[in-house]
Image (cartoon, rainbow, N blue to C red):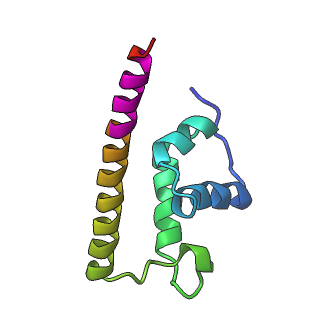
């Protein structure tokens, strides 16, 4: 049987911050800190159930609308397509240069 571990409130807050603010996936944080996922889920749920006015500014819910998200997605998709095109150009250039004597 495993020994029960008590985590400090500061440690819990740091783990929740890494997930909610820094955007690190919960599975990675749990693996790095050697914490059971169910514990972290409970900490995040408890944090999310706080009154939004009590939450630190960096963890408040986004005020972006669906249209804002769509516009952001469209911009990212366009940038991704451009990057893929540039990658193809570089590949072709490398192929041409590598055939030169």
Instruction: Give the percent coordinates (x, y) of residue 63.
Output: 41, 84
User: In the figure, 26 relative to 21: above or below?
Assistant: above
Q: Is residue 28 left or right of residue 78?
A: right
Q: Is residue 65 left or right of residue 24?
A: left
Q: Which residue is pictured at 59% across the width and 56% down the height? A: 18
Q: Which residue is pictured at 56% across the width and 26% down the height? A: 1
Tell me if residue 65 is in the magenta stretch. Answer: no
Q: Is residue 34 visible?
A: no
Q: Is residue 68 visible?
A: yes
Q: Is residue 62 left or right of residue 72?
A: right
Which span is picked out in magenta? 89-98
Q: Which residue is pictured at 56% across the width and 44% down the height? A: 29
> In the current view of this chain or complex, which residue is farthest to the bottom?
53
Q: Nearer the viewer, residue 79 or 26?
A: 79
User: In the figure, 66 relative to 2: above or below?
Assistant: below
Q: Nearer the viewer, residue 57 or 68?
A: 68
Instruction: Give the percent coordinates (x, y) of residue 53.
Output: 56, 88
Q: Is residue 57 left or right of residue 96?
A: right
Q: Which residue is pictured at 30% across the width and 61% down the height? A: 78
Q: Nearer the viewer, residue 79 or 19?
A: 79
> In the current view of this chain or complex, which residue is farthest to the front?
101
User: In the figure, 10 relative to 48: above or below?
Assistant: above
Look at the image and tell me in which quarter the C terminus lies.
Answer: top left
User: In the figure, 94 relative to 62: above or below?
Assistant: above
Q: Nearer the viewer, residue 96 or 3?
A: 96
Tell me if residue 91 is in the magenta stretch. Answer: yes
SS majority, magenta: helix
Instruction: Give the percent coordinates (x, y) of residue 67.
Output: 26, 81
């Amino acid at each position: 049987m495993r020994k029960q571990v008590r985590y400090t409130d500061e440690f819990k807050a740091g783990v929740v911050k890494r997930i909610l603010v820094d955007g690190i996936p919960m599975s990675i944080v749990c693996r790095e800190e050697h914490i059971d996922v169910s514990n972290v889920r409970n900490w995040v749920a408890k944090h999310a159930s706080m009154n939004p006015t009590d939450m630190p500014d960096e963890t408040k819910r986004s005020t972006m609308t669906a249209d804002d998200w769509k516009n952001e997605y469209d911009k990212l998709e366009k940038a991704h397509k451009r990057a893929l095109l540039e990658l193809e150009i570089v590949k072709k250039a490398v192929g041409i240069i590598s055939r030169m004597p």
